[in-house]
Image: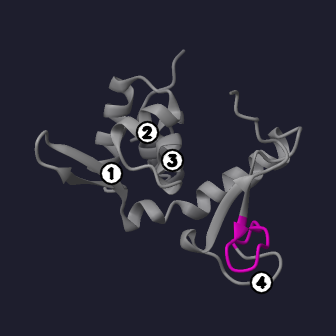
Amino acid sequence: MALPRTYEDQNCSIARALEVVGDRWTLLVIRSAFEGVRRFDDFQEALGVARNVLTDRLTRLCDEGLLRRVRYQDRPERYEYRLTRKGVELWPAMMTLLLWGDRHYAPDGPPTLVRHAGCGGALTPRMTCSSCGAALEPTDVEACPGPGAVEPID
């Protein structure tokens, strides 16, 4: 039996949030947006997702107010997608999921390390720096390859 796509019968904020972000491609689009990806073709290249699926996810994220479309070219008309405040508020949840995945599903070590750009300390589950204790926001960190990173094929 297939699970329904919506949870209107459940009075639960987790279920309601899952209606928006509970799909694999949606979370990967958001991850890419945090990594600085903004244009459709760049999302498609980074994710390897079918164009129709990507169009659907970007439209949904814009409709839900997590991304906004900003025109960057008139002829032909082209847009980029930028995180809104609502989208940026997903950062702690995304980082918690990343750290959880590192603990349980990264046998060769984390593929990506999230470091405090100010001092190089690691991101902790409390969204603070392991070295200096600073509270960290998305603009305070940088990602670098970790021990589990896959080497690019030349």
Separation (CA) of disc 2 from disc 4: 33 Å
| Relative image position of residue 55 (x, y in whole percent) | 31, 33
Residue at x 83%, y 79% (from the top left corner): 131
Residue 117 covered by magenta stretch: yes
Magenta segment range? 115-127
Element carrying mark 3? helix
> Which mark is on residue 133?
4
Which comes sooner in the sequence, label 1 or label 3? 3
Q: Quadrant of the N terminus?
A: top right
Label pair 2/4, CB-CB below 8 angstroms: no
Question: In the picture provided, is 21 more to the left or to the right than 141?
Answer: left
- Mark nearest the camera among 4 and 1 is 1
Foreground: 57 or 11?
A: 57
Which comes sooner in the sequence, label 2 or label 4? 2
Residue at x 42%, y 39% (from the top left corner): 42
Look at mark 2 in the image and give the residue it sits on.
Answer: 43
Answer yes or no: is residue 10 visible.
no
